[in-house]
């Protein structure tokens, strides 16, 4: 397809840049790559959740002379995975703190011999008592991390919540919980590593953030920057699950490569990937909310706790985003949020699309429905009375300067879903049907880009160059793993420069080739890095005009001729630009006050749910999503992002349960960790309202995480509408629905006026 | 040891091939390792995700569950055999236009399931598409773009994208 500037490339549904390769089966994922003389690596893991390693024995029935074995003692540099805290060992050294923690690595030329070898390693432990829950960690039953188990805490205060409790007309309390969730990217984690004394370490792999892996490898191997090279291969899904874990796996594969003197491939099978890698943090959120007689918010007191698992990984930053999304798109003069992430002996939890926001948004949007019920007002009306508007301030006292259209999004969602007619119909029909239908809503925002001063600290560098072969290359370390990075950044470059989409390629995300434009996380790529590419493209054109005689209007041939004139003069044709913060941005990291995010995407979700009161299966029958995400640069890709996020959110609410037994994931197979299939996902209707954000790439804001935030509360609110039963935790599989609905039925039989409230909101009216 | 392995003859993407392999070696591994047809992917290794779907004698199979011994004399088609004479198969073109592929790892299996479906039912309705693809998991798309791709490939109008009308411009 030839897309010219006359068509305006930005805003069109340009076909996926690497789409044909993927459709023809030509795209090369890590496990598709074979190297001459390559060995295969595998991992010996802890079988207990906590204890001291007393001895490691090697069964003599295995010929160990043909196997490379790596332990912590083989690590030339620091035995740490570098992320935020240096607390997580690359390989356990003397002690294990969670099940499936890596202790020892082995490599052999025949991958089929690895399993026998792993089974022939015998580790004796002195077990220590483990803890697995937030409550056990809070009580400090055991100290398993630092001096008090507390990985990170935040206290955010606006106004004075204590000033309103006595005078408030209503106070409503509630507690809400969310479970762990597995990313279940269909391609498991995998790395190929090469080592040489001369060139250091080179790794190829399925990963999101090449420079994160680079940062760990230089420390583990004690090498200078230029002796470590990290190259992303085609990546089959990530969703945050390949943000930090590849740093561990790359270290392992490279250690085996160094010791064996062979190229080593390590690709996890599904059971290992599920058992050993990160998941979404489980959470508990308590709300205490004061309102006046008209249902206007007076105070929100929110107490948040997450289970961080055995090591800190990204728990502190996940907690930060959870905190900043906890108060939702509402205006409230007094807010107090106390947030804590606690260590346990579970496998470390990590980044997953939404990054803490789905947890606290579930709590808040369920709580809003509980408040509406307690006050006897319509849940829509409660939200309308409290929405943030331009000129209001958020909980961090960030002034809302940009247009903010929650009312408009809500009205559009109600109209598109025919909300009122459906709700009335279900109320009529449910009396005579074993299948109870309901409709639920969630209103929310998602902050785009790194939190607070994060983008300034990242200080991203990105650009474009032109090769002598006549290709413009986009130079970024941001990666494609399905979201559309390649396509949209190419569209932006084509638009800025004014040449065809097909004349632009993406440079491989290779730390030896591309500058550090930051990680591919936090819904930042199109907004932040896209803006850098827009600026770089415009800078390139300006340079060609000033220094190589390019005219105001030009043909493709004139553009490339000017590039060659510039090359002859300067030796290269390149434009690199560095991040510049939008003006007027202020953030106080100590007080958690100021501009938490440069922009927010806003959304309203509506779910129609049917609950079968015979089988206790809840099914989402139809879903509507209305959002304002700045300018939509590629409608087909943007719609696909929203739909995919909603499907994951449906799984989070109704299907996906991580079952832990003594710290090990018991259902670590696709057979019994269930995600929504083609028959489970309902029709999803996606609508955009566009308000260009002037500091984002061609007006874009972040979009990737937003759609995962809303489905769970919308669905559980719909279940309440259908059944009258308030559920305060997810996931809700049939057995979970049964437990509570059956309890209610028996209570009804005994005393119909006194239904048990699940984990119990209560309302008190001030005297 | 390899001398004792049987030679198994079958057809892959229209070409005859002979593979000497342990009889219980998975068809998936024979395709990927012996024949270097790496378009077929492994997602779970237990027949749940459908990423390794190929067509064998006109049936859709999970190649991770098929020992190569069973493949002798069979006619196997993989994703590499879909495109004909340098042009994308109509399904591939529709997936490209309608956003049916995101990360791409489920895509080869999804395409084989869709090809099987439309061979048996050239004009499937939405319920039939959902049923036909129910054995293939996608974690990226939420399936909507995939359904639309299959619908587009089975209707005569070459330009899909009915969703455009939904966008507030």
Image (cartoon, rainbow, N blue to C red):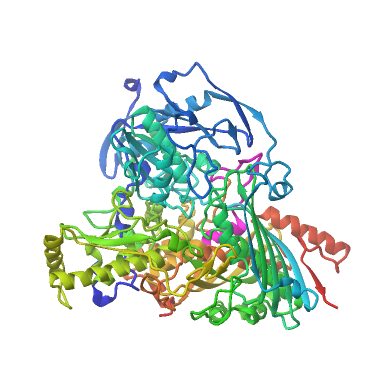
In-front residue for pair A35/B123: A35
> Is A657 colored magenta in this rendering?
yes
Residue at image location 19% in from the left, 58% down from the top: A467
Relative height, residue A754 to residue B11 (above, below)? below
In-front residue for pair A328/A161: A161
- In the picture provided, is B46 more to the left or to the right than A141? left
The x and y percentages for residue A283 are 64, 56
- Residue A147, picture quadrant: top right
In-front residue for pair A419/B70: A419
Residue at image location 35% in from the left, 20% down from the top: B1
Q: Which residues are magenta?
A: A647-671
User: Where does the C terminus of chain A fall, quadrant-wise?
Assistant: bottom right
Relative height, residue A369 to residue A738 (above, below)? below
User: Where does the N terminus of chain A fall, quadrant-wise?
Assistant: bottom left
- Residue A131, picture quadrant: top right
- In the picture provided, is B153 more to the left or to the right than A147? left
Relative height, residue A530 to residue B117 (above, below)? below
The x and y percentages for residue A159 are 67, 74
The x and y percentages for residue A591 are 60, 65
**Residue B66 at least partly seen:** no
């Amino acid at each position: 397809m030839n897309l010219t500037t006359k068509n305006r490339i930005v805003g069109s549904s340009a076909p996926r840049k690497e789409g044909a390769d993927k459709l023809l089966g030509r795209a090369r994922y890590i496990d598709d790559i074979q190297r001459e003389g390559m060995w295969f690596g595998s991992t010996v893991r802890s079988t207990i959740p906590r204890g001291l390693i007393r001895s490691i024995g090697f069964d003599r029935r295995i010929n160990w002379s043909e196997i490379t074995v790596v332990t912590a003692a083989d690590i030339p540099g620091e035995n740490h995975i570098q992320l935020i805290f240096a607390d997580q060992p690359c390989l356990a050294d003397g002690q294990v703190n969670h099940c499936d923690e890596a202790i020892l690595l082995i490599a052999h030329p025949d991958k089929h011999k690895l399993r026998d070898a792993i089974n022939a390693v015998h580790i004796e432990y002195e077990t220590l008592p483990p803890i697995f829950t937030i409550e056990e960690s809070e009580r400090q039953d055991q100290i398993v991390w630092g001096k008090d188990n507390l990985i990170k805490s935040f206290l955010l205060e606006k106004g004075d919540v204590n000033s309103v409790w006595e005078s408030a007309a209503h106070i409503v309390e509630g507690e809400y919980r969310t479970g762990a969730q597995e990313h279940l990217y269909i391609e498991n984690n995998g790395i190929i590593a090469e080592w040489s004394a001369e060139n250091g370490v080179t790794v190829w792999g399925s990963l999101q953030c090449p420079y994160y892996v680079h940062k760990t490898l230089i420390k583990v191997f004690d090498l200078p920057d230029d002796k470590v090279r990290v190259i992303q291969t085609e990546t089959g899904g990530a969703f945050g699950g390949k943000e930090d874990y590849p740093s561990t796996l790359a270290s392992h594969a490279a250690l085996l490569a160094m010791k064996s003197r062979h190229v080593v491939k390590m690709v996890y099978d599904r059971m290992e990937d599920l058992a050993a890698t990160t998941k979404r943090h489980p959470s508990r959120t308590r709300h205490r909310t004061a309102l006046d007689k008209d249902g206007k918010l007076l105070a929100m007191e929110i107490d948040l706790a997450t289970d961080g698992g055995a090591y800190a990984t990204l728990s502190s930053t996940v907690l930060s985003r959870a905190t900043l999304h906890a108060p939702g798109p509402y205006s409230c003069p007094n807010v107090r949020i106390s947030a804590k992430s606690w260590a346990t002996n579970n496998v470390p939890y990590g980044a997953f699309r939404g990054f803490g926001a789905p947890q606290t948004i579930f709590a808040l949007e369920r709580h809003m429905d509980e408040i509406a019920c307690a006050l006897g007002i319509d849940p829509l009306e409660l939200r309308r009375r409290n929405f943030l508007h331009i000129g209001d301030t958020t909980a961090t006292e960030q002034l809302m300067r940009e247009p903010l259209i929650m009312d408009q999004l809500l009205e559009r969602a109600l109209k598109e879903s025919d909300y009122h007619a459906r709700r009335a119909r279900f109320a009529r029909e449910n009396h005579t049907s074993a299948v109870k239908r309901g409709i639920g809503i969630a209103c929310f925002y998602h902050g785009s880009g790194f939190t607070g001063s994060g983008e300034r600290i990242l200080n991203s560098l990105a650009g474009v160059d032109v090769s002598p072969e006549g290709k413009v290359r986009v130079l970024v370390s941001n990666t494609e793993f399905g979201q559309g990075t390649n396509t949209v950044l190419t569209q932006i470059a084509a638009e800025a420069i004014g040449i065809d989409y097909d004349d632009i390629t993406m440079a491989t995300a290779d730390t030896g080739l591309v500058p550090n434009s930051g990680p591919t996380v936090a819904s930042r790529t199109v907004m932040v890095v896209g803006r850098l590419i827009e600026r770089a493209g415009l800078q390139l054109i300006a340079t060609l005009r000033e220094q190589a005689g390019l005219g105001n209007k030009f043909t493709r041939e004139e553009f490339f001729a000017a590039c060659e004139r510039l090359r002859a003069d300067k030796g290269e044709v390149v434009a690199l630009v560095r991040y510049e913060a939008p003006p007027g941005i202020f953030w106080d990291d100590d007080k958690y006050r100021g501009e938490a995010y440069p922009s927010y995407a806003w959304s309203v979700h509506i779910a129609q749910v049917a609950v079968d009161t015979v089988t206790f299966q809840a099914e989402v029958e139809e879903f509507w999503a209305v959002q304002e995400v700045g300018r939509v640069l590629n409608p087909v890709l943007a719609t696909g992002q929203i739909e995919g996020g909603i499907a994951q959110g449906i799984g989070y609410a109704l299907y996906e349960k991580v079952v832990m037994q003594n710290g090990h994931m018991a259902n670590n197979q696709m057979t019994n960790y269930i995600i929504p299939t083609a028959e489970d996902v309902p029709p999803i209707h996606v609508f955009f309202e566009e308000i260009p954000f002037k500091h984002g790439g061609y007006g874009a804001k972040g979009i990737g995480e937003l759609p995962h935030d809303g489905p769970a509360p919308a669905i559980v609110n719909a279940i309440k509408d259908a059944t009258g039963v308030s559920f305060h935790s997810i996931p809700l599989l049939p057995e979970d629905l049964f437990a509570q609905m059956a309890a209610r039925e028996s209570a009804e039989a005994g005393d119909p006026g006194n239904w048990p409230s699940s984990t119990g909101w209560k309302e008190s009216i001030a005297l | 040891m390899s001398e004792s392995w049987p030679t198994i003859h079958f057809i892959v993407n229209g070409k005859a091939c002979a593979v000497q392999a342990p009889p219980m070696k998975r068809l998936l591994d024979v395709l990927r390792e012996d024949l270097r047809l790496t378009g077929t992917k492994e997602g779970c290794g237990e027949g749940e995700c459908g990423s390794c779907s190929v067509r064998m004698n006109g049936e859709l199979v999970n190649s991770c569950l098929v020992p190569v011994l069973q493949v002798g004399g069979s006619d196997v088609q993989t994703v590499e055999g879909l495109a004909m004479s340098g042009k994308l198969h109509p399904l591939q073109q529709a997936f490209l236009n309608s956003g049916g592929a995101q990360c791409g790892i489920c895509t080869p299996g999804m395409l084989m399931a869709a090809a099987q479906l439309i061979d048996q039912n050239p004009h499937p309705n939405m319920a039939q598409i959902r049923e036909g693809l129910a054995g293939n998991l996608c974690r990226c798309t939420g399936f909507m773009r995939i359904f639309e791709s299959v619908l587009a490939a089975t209707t005569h109008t070459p330009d899909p994208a009915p969703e455009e009308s939904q966008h507030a411009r």
